[in-house]
Amino acid sequence: MTVVLVGLPASGKSTVGPLLAHALGEPFIDADAAIEARTGRSIPEIFAQGGEAAFRAVEAETIRELLARGGVIALGGGAVTTAYVRAALRGQTVVWLTVGEDEALLRAREGSRPLLDGPGAWARLARERAGFYAEVASLCVDTTGATPEAVARQIANAVRPGKDQP
């Protein structure tokens, strides 16, 4: 079984993912962690050294490999901006995690997120990427004010084998 989590930075993909994987009895893979392992560099380092285009190329190849393996896969927030990734997600179970801006910005303070620097950055990303998320999503779940456990349960109940797919 493959379930792919997509959404803006700080929507909860990396937090909900392991809980969902456990509930489904599947492995969890964070695409950003897989990219860092593959390149031996952090995401901010990849951005600083090669720019967003270089990062997106490595990201697309990594996602191709991860989809072939299966499991619960959390993609980076901008992965869906690449046409190849969107095409690869067709036919997959893709869950779009949404979150309100205020909560996302509170969550984002906990980590390094190179594309959230500057005033209005999150809102700009939300506007730019909403159509991409909608294009690939088979299910949309709002994480605002919800516990990661509740979100994972909601998704697991919706995607378990034998259930009608959302």
Image (cartoon, rainbow, N blue to C red):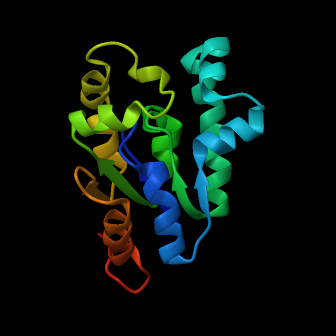
Asked whether, in this view, residue 37 is left or right of residue 153, the answer is: right
**In the figure, 163 relative to 100: above or below?**
below
Question: The C terminus appears in which quarter of the rendering?
Answer: bottom left
**In the figure, 16 relative to 23: above or below?**
above
Foreground residue among 59 and 37: 37
Quarter location, residue 34: top right
Q: What residue lies at 33% left-to-right and 43% top-to-bottom?
A: 133
Q: What residue lies at 49% left-to-right and 21% top-to-bottom?
A: 114
Quarter location, residue 118: top left
Q: What residue lies at 36% left-to-right and 38% top-to-bottom?
A: 107
**In the figure, 104 relative to 68: above or below?**
above
* Residue 52 % position (x, y): 55, 19
Asked whether, in this view, residue 76 is left or right of residue 8, the answer is: right
Q: What residue lies at 30% left-to-right and 37% top-to-bottom?
A: 104
Foreground residue among 93 and 20: 20
* Residue 119 % position (x, y): 28, 13
Asked whether, in this view, residue 54 is left or right of residue 22, the answer is: right
Q: Is residue 90 visible?
A: no
**In the figure, 9 relative to 93: above or below?**
above
Question: The N terminus appears in which quarter of the rendering?
Answer: bottom right
